[in-house]
């Protein structure tokens, strides 16, 4: 499996109120599915 240039393998999320705190890292495909679920939910509401 090869990585695409310019496409991150993982997405790191942090608390904007604690910018130097810990991060949660998710595989890009998992995060994309999460965002798609949020978008779908808002269009159904």
Image: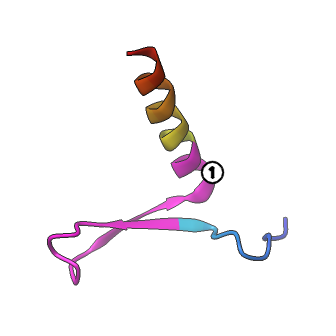
Indicate left or right for 24 with 34 as reference.
Answer: left
Residue 19 higher or lower than 10, as above or below: below
Tell me if 15 is positioned left or right of 8 in this view. Answer: left
Tell me if residue 18 comes above or below residue 25 in the rendering.
below
The secondary element bearing badge 1 is classed as helix
Q: Quadrant of residue 21 in the image?
A: bottom left
Front one among 4 and 45:
45
Question: If the image is split into quadrants, where does the N terminus sit?
Answer: bottom right
The outermost residue toward the top is 44
* Residue closest to the eye, 1 or 40: 40
Where is residue 14? Give x, y as percent. Answer: 30, 68
**In the image, residue 40 lies in the stretch drawn in magenta:** no
Q: Mark 1 packing: few (<14 Cα in 10 Å), some, or many (20+)?
A: few
Tell me which residue sits at (15%, 70%) in the image.
17
Q: Is residue 25 magenta?
A: yes
Task: Please say if 18 is above or below 26.
Answer: below
Magenta stretch bounds:
11-32
Q: Quadrant of the C terminus?
A: top left
Give the residue number, with chain letter if any, for mark 1. Answer: 29
Give the image location of residue 39, x and y in percent: 49, 33
Could you tell me which residue is drawn at 32 percent across and 71 percent down? Answer: 23
| Residue at image location 80% in from the left, 70% down from the top | 4
Colour scheme in use: rainbow
* Residue 2 in the image: above or below residue 40: below
Q: In the drawing, does residue 18 fall left or right of residue 14?
A: left
Outermost right residue: 1
């Amino acid at each position: 499996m090869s990585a695409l240039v310019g496409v991150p393998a993982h997405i790191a999320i942090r608390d904007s109120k604690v910018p130097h705190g810990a991060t949660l890292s998710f595989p890009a495909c998992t995060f994309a599915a999460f965002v798609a679920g949020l978008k779908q939910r808002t269009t159904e509401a």
